[in-house]
């Protein structure tokens, strides 16, 4: 999530400054941050109940986004 927020912020800054270099440096920074967090975060077992709940939430979010896009 932090990598996505970082990429969004860098994208907005790059667009505001119209600088290609800022965008490239932001992508490199976000990728480096993602790899660093991937290596430092402990892995935990995923229980079936969590995956089912996550799948339901994903479906609800997708349907909600589709319905909201109809009113744009």
Image (spheres, rainbow, N blue to C red):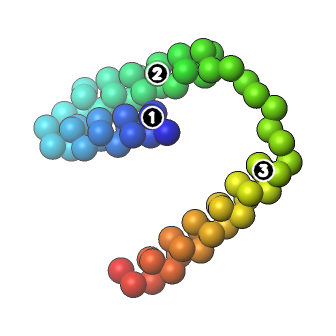
* Element carrying mark 3: helix
Q: Nearer the viewer, residue 45 or 23?
A: 45
Dot 3 corresponds to which residue? Answer: 51
- Residue 28 lies, with reference to residue 13, above or below; the image says above
Residue 53's spot in the image, x, y percent? Answer: 74, 57
Say whether residue 20 is left or right of residue 65: left
Q: Nearer the viewer, mark 3 or mark 2?
A: 3
* Residue at mark 1 to residue at mark 2: CA–CA distance: 9 Å
Local SS, label 1 = helix
Give the quadrant of residue 17: top left
Residue 5 drawn at (x, y percent) = 39, 40
Q: Residue at x 19, y 34 (%)?
A: 19
Where does the image place residue 58, in percent across and percent down from the top left? 65, 61
Image position of 45 (left or right of 26) = right
Q: Distance between the residues labelled 3 and 1?
A: 22 Å
Instruction: Residue at 55% x, 21% y: name it.
Output: 37
Distance of label 3 from label 2 (alpha carbons): 26 Å
Marks 1 and 2 close (CB-CB < 8 Å): yes
3 and 1 marks in contact (CB < 8 Å): no
Task: Please tell me whether residue 51 is drawn above or below residue 55 in the rendered image.
Answer: above
The quadrant where residue 14 appears: top left
In the image shown, does 37 or 18 lie closer to the viewer?
37
**Which SS class for mark 2?**
helix
Residue picked out by circle 2 = 33
How many other residues sit within 10 Å of disc 1, few (<14), some (14-19) or many (≥20)? Answer: few
Dot 3 or dot 1: first in sequence order is 1
* Residue drawn 29% across the image and 35% down it: 10
Farthest residue, direction right: 48
Q: Crowding near pointer 3: few (<14 within 10 Å), some, many (20+)?
A: few
Q: Name the residue under label 1.
A: 2
Picture quadrant of residue 42: top right
Task: Indicate whether 48 appears above or below 71.
Answer: above
């Amino acid at each position: 999530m932090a990598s996505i927020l970082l990429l969004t912020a860098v994208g907005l800054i790059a667009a505001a400054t119209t600088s290609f270099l800022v965008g490239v440096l932001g992508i490199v920074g976000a990728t480096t941050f993602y790899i660093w967090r991937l290596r430092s975060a402990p892995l935990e077992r995923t229980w079936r109940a969590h995956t089912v709940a996550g799948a339901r939430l994903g479906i609800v979010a997708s349907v909600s986004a589709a319905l909201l896009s109809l009113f744009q």
